[in-house]
Image: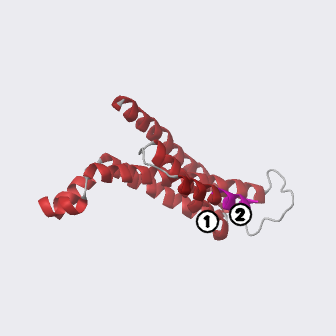
Amino acid sequence: MKSFLSRRWRLLLAWTLPTACAVGCILSPLRGYGAVSRVVAQKIPLGSPLHISVVYTWSAILVIVVASVVGDVLLARAMKQVGDVGELRRRVGIFAVIGRTLGNPNFLLGVTAMAVAFFSLLFALSWGDVSLVAPAAASLTFIGNAVAAKIFLHERVDRRRWIAASLVAAGVALLAG
């Protein structure tokens, strides 16, 4: 069972981080198309600069969500491996806590994933409105964190959190539509 979990983590990291980096690298030169100022309820022709900007905005939001969820899960796993920081600090000192935290590979990968999420947020804000990008990224990250906590960290996610996640998903659907 232990080797299956480590294999699953390796697959998650091997797919997610390079994909997020590749999407950011591919889309970054194309940011000159400008931000979406207002999307009216009309059909946007495929290939138009407005349509391309909407695709870029939602692609960047997807990268933000994936990278944030991966980063949050890796950071949570790293801190669970480090242990109780207050107790550890009292026993061996603050520098040992810092060394133990920075020496954890999950912590370093989590920080890298969060950096990818941050730079993807910058790209998304250059292409889309903050009133769309910030709430969509934050709420979809909330949903992703609930799912990832259940699957990868084996946390108990109660019914109230699932109801909250579905209400958040409904809010994102209203925002996008």
Rendered-image quadrant of the N terminus:
top left
Q: Is residue 129 left or right of residue 15?
A: right
Q: Is residue 63 magenta?
A: no
The residue most toward the front is 159
- Residue 117: numbered disc: none
Q: Identify residue for label 2.
A: 175
Q: Which residue is rendered at x = 34% and y = 47% of the image?
A: 106
On the image, which quarter does residue 85 sit in? Answer: bottom left
Image coordinates of residue 35 in percent, x first then y, are 69, 66
Residue 64 appears in the figure = no
What segment carries the magenta color?
Answer: 169-177
Q: How many marks?
A: 2
Q: Is residue 19 left or right of residue 6?
A: right
Image coordinates of residue 46 in percent, x first then y, are 81, 50
Residue type, label 1? Pro
Secondary structure type for disc 2: helix
Q: Which residue is rendered at x = 23% and y = 59% of the image?
A: 98
Q: Is residue 153 left or right of residue 85?
A: right
Q: Which residue is rendered at x = 37% and y = 35% of the image?
A: 6
Rendered-image quadrant of the C terminus:
bottom right
Q: Is residue 170 magenta?
A: yes
Q: Is the Cβ of the residue at disc 1 closer than 8 Å to that at disc 2? A: yes
Mark 1 closeness class: few <14, some 14–19, many ≥20 residues within 10 Å: some
Mark 2 closeness class: few <14, some 14–19, many ≥20 residues within 10 Å: few
Q: Please tell me which residue lies in front, 83 or 127.
A: 83
Q: Main secondary structure of the magenta part?
A: helix
Secondary structure type for disc 1: helix
Image coordinates of residue 114 in percent, x first then y, are 45, 56
- Residue 135: numbered disc: 1
Q: CA distance from mark 1 to mark 2?
A: 8 Å
